[in-house]
Amino acid sequence: MRHKITAGLLALFALSPVLAARSPLETVNQFYTLRLQNGAYDTPTGLDLAAFSSYLAPELVCMLGAAIRYSDQYAKALPEQARPFANVDLYASGPTLPARFSTGSSLTNGSSNKTQVTFSLDNVADGPSTEWTDTILVSLRRKRWLISDIEYGNGPADASQGSLMTRLRDVLTHPHEAAQWDVRELGACVIEAAPVKQASKARQRVKKATASSRAKPAKRARSAAPSGKRKR
């Protein structure tokens, strides 16, 4: 029942037309503003993901949803162990939720964008704050700019490495045996292909090319009419 409610919320937010015309930079700014206001660093919940899903690409929403389900199964099987992704912030490479952020360069190339975001943590004992920069990958999907991955930068010593999608994939494709996790669930988490109309046209072109390349069977040649009477 819980998964059905979560799936319904995700579908509702994914179809929401809110801020459909926002730029890549606006997408990143609004996402992290919401994260710092309402988000908690730790294993994500269905409600957390529903709140953020309108800023995320479908394949990332799918992977995060799979991470939630795996985390639930892991906790049931190993209640004494810390959940996967516990005590970390998946959306930045620091060890905890950042205190603040600021956006830097934002470069767009066709339907892809890279926006740099600098995060900072407040250190104790009046020490200087710790800063690091991550790169946010934003993709244009059906006229909407959505975050498709987060490349972790040079954060603190205990910061995450790689990227968000890589981290999710590494954990979910190497599950703990006790969790009885079915890796095949990730088969649905694929990057959106070309728009349906373009894909349909491409298939039609392939069919036409295939049909035209087939050799038509040659008609039987008619026997030539006799040129004259046979000689006796």
Image (cartoon, rainbow, N blue to C red):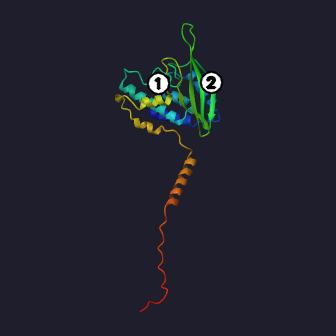
Question: Residue at left 45%, top 22%?
Answer: 86
Going by the numbered disc 1, the residue's amino acid type is: Thr
Tag on residue 43? 1
Q: For this rendering, which residue is in front, 207 or 53?
A: 207
Q: Is residue 132 above or below residue 174?
A: above
Name the side, left or right, on which 196 lies relative to 3: right
* Residue that sits furthest to the bottom in the current view: 232
- Quarter residue 144 falls in: top right
10 Å crowding of disc 2: few (<14), some (14-19), many (20+): some
Badge nearest the viewer, 2 or 1: 2
C-alpha gap between disc 2 and disc 1: 25 Å
Residue 125 visible to an observer of this rendering: yes
Residue 5 visible to an observer of this rendering: no
Which one is earlier in the sequence, the residue at label 2 or at label 1?
A: 1
**Residue 155: where, in percent of width, then height?**
53, 20
* Residue that sits furthest to the front in the current view: 231
Going by the numbered disc 2, the residue's amino acid type is: Thr
Q: For this rendering, which residue is in front, 24 or 12?
A: 24
* SS state under label 1: loop
Q: Is residue 209 above or below residue 139?
A: below
In the picture, the quarter occupied by the C terminus is bottom left
Q: For this rendering, which residue is in front, 232 or 123?
A: 232
Q: Which residue is mark 2?
A: 103
**Residue 171: where, in percent of width, then height?**
42, 29
**Residue 203: where, in percent of width, then height?**
53, 51
**Residue 67: where, in percent of width, then height?**
45, 30
* SS state under label 2: strand
Name the side, left or right, on which 148 lies relative to 170: right
In the picture, the quarter occupied by the N terminus is top left
Are circles 2 and 1 on residues that touch, CB within 8 Å? no
